[in-house]
Structures are given as C-alpha cells and as structure tokens.
Amino acid sequence: MASTTSSDVLPVQNAGSFYVGAIVEIQTQAAPEYHLVNAVLPGNLLQLDKKISVTLPPPPPSPNPPKPFFARVVELDVTILDTSTGAVETFRGCGWGATADPAFRARHYANVVNVNSKLAYVQPPDKEGTGTGDQPMTSDGFPVPLLGGQDGTPADQDFIGVDNGPGNRSGIQSLQDLEDISIIACPGETADDIQQALITQCENMRYRFAILDGEQTPGVSNGVTSVTSILTHRNNYSSAFAAYYTPWVQIDNGTIVIDLPPSGYVAGIYARVDNDRGVWKAPANEALRNITGLDAYITTGEQDILNPSGVDCIRRFAGRGILVWGARTLASDPEVKYVNVKRYLIYLEHSLDKGTQWVVFEPNAAPTWTRVVDSVTAFLHTQWRVGALFGAKPEDAFYVRCDETTMSADDIQNGRLICDIGVAIVRPAEFVIFRIEQITGFGTAA
C-alpha cells in the first residue's frame, strides 16, 4: 500500500519492484494517475516525474478493483506468434516509458524484442507517435534508441567516425579492427566525404573493396540531365579499390514502394558469385533477388555513355529480370578497370600473404626459396585449373621466381625474401561481337 503526498516523492511499503523509468499507476479515490519513476530513494521512497497521460487499451472489468492509494508498476508481456509455423516468443516484464537511462532503455519492449526476437521487429515509438500504430506509449514518447550514444540525425562525421586507436574507433574507422573483411559499403550515404572514407580505408588496408551507391533519383534539374548528374557525382572518385552502382532499387511491402540503395544487394551478389564461381568471375549479368523494380530505368544508349566511365548500371531486361549490367572499377589504369580483375589480385595477394607466413624467421637461403616456389606454384596451378587464369597450359598462365635474380645481397642481409609472381588473369567478355557474311552467289560445276 502507498499514500500520496503533495510532493513528487511517494513513500511505499517496499520499493524493491520499482526502478528508474518504470511507469507507476497510482490508484486514488478518483481516476488512476500515471507517473514516471525518476529515482528510487533510500527509505522506500519513489521520486516521481510529473503526471503523464498514457495510451493503453481499456483493461477488462475487475470484480476486485485496487484499493485506494495503491501503487503498482505497469509493465508489458509481449507475445509474438508466427501463424505460418506456429512458433511463439514471449517476453515478460518489459518497460515502455520514456527516459534516457541506458539501463531502462535496455528493458524497453522495443529493444527487448529487436535484440532477442527471431520473428519480428518493433519500430520504437517517438514523440509524434510515427509508425507506432496501437503500441503503448506515454505522452512523452520514446525516441528511437541509440544505446550508448545520442538521439538525432547522424552527420557525415558520425558515419566516418574517429580513429582513437584499437578498440576506440567509431563509424567506418571501426572496420579497421576486423582484418578479414573483404567488402565494405555505407548503404544510402552518397556524400563525397563518406564515400571517400570507404575508398581511403580500402587503399590503406589493401585487402578490401568498396561498393559505392549512386545518388538517389538524379533527375533533370536546371537543364542538367540525369546522365550528366550521375557522371558529375561519379567523377568525384578515382580508385581501383571501388565500384559505383546506380540506380536505387525498389521493394513493395504491400502498402508502399520503398527505395533502397543498391550497395547492399550488390554486396550480396559479390558474395554469391565468390562462393558459386570464384572471385575471378565478374559479379555482373547476375539477378538482384527479392526486389520489385528500379528507381529509374536506364536505356541502352545511356548505358553506352555511363559504362565506359566506370558507372555500373542495374537494368531490367524483358524475360530475364533485373540484372547488374556492369563490372568496372573507378580506376583510371586500364589494367585494373574490371572489378573481378582487381578483386582477384587482392584475393591472390591476401591468400599468398597468409599462406606463406611460415616463411617468417626461416633461413633466407636456397632451401627456403625452393619451398616458397613449390607452395605458390601449387596454389596458382589450382587457380588455373578452376579457370581463374588464362592460358592453355600452366606455363602460359603464371610464373613464380624466388632466387638470386629476385633478391640482391642487400635484400638478403636485411631479411627481405622477395618472390616474383606473374599471372594472366581472365577478363570478362564485356562485348559479344558477331560478324555475319551474306553469300550472294554460288559456284557452278564445270
């Protein structure tokens, strides 16, 4: 039992079940009042926020209504049912108030469901009640949570992040802490500084590749056509470690059509082609799955302008669906103008780097050189056999040298073991050309 006072402190018999952020229902002789708990004080005292209004479905009639001056915590039990499989999830004792306290936010029903559920996602309510439907909320609302951060619209620098050393990096910079990443993107963020941060990281770390999104709906503005707008944005970058894709894709959730950046779908295609064929296969002429349309439909004439400039288009083809129809990097060097060529070189270098770590601190002498040549040759021979290297026989596809011709006496004295490797990488058949001759006459027998 509890008694009300004129202050914002409420004494209760036992404060053990109350916590900061909890919504307290106080049953008075009049209508119930609802307050937010700001603090649990010594002596079984609750420090309450101002009276708030709440939106809840009406409770069922009770034959035993609460006694006057009765205080209790109002919590939610959330049950999720998948009608197609019969799977059920239940989350009990969830909070639903509005407070910045991190401990409470972790127990808010939106966070509890989104962190633990395999069946559903809950859109957290906000002050305007946007997208909440019939979800319970207070008059203060509950802003979309950023645990450990600050609510609001992130700026470009929030995406780029800061580099304060291992374990203390944020944003894109934090990806440096994970060495085995091979593809990175920042979906939907087309600002130059954000995309340049992706490129810079790939160039510095050598073994990863960036997928950049084109701007959404670059239409006609002040006499500038969409093709010109696309090229203007694309020309801000020059790197063999990145590729640029346009237009955005669309999905239909049954109510509205949603535009989404292509980089996430393209990254999935990269991974799918890597697994099914190999890194050496161009990630193009591949279908984008589970989309319903495109934000813009690029014509063959526009493709002929954009593709040579390093813009990889996503196009719709009758009877074939929506396909990635380009595989060019943003490089000015023609030797690495194709995505698969550059990514395969990255793959080779990374694989050989990891696969020859055993050489470190071995004697820098002929027996070690021979073992290195044998190891690298076996690896490249396998690559040739699966079709990654060009040539009718292994000798035409690659060479490996590690001997006195690749290292000077100074290299050996200073611990540098140098292996010279050459590979002939297959390139995509970007244009298929047929020559057709019409025969206009026939010879006659003598």
Image (cartoon, rainbow, N blue to C red):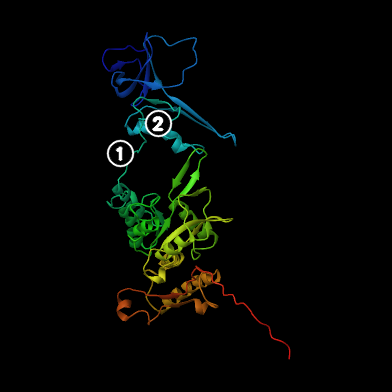
The N terminus - image quarter: top left
Where disc 1 sits, the SS reads loop
Q: Residue at x 55, y 71 (%)?
A: 385
Front-most of residues 176 and 341: 341
| Amino acid carrying mark 2 in the image | His
Quarter of the rendering containing residue 442: bottom right
Q: What's under tag 1, amino acid-wise?
A: Gln
Residue holding disc 1: 150
Comparing 239 with 274, the one in front is 239
Q: Which of 121 and 131 is in front in this view?
A: 131
User: In the drawing, what numbered circle is on residue 108?
Assistant: 2
Q: Eyeballing the image, is 432 above or below 104?
A: below
Q: Residue at x 32, y 31 (%)?
A: 101
Outermost residue, bottom direction?
446
- How many angstroms separate mark 1 from mark 2 (CA)? 17 Å
Mark 2, other Cα within 10 Å: few <14 / some 14–19 / many ≥20? many
Q: Which residue does the image show at 53% across and 48% down from the upper left?
A: 290
Query: Is 19 drawn above or below residue 248 in the view shown?
Result: above
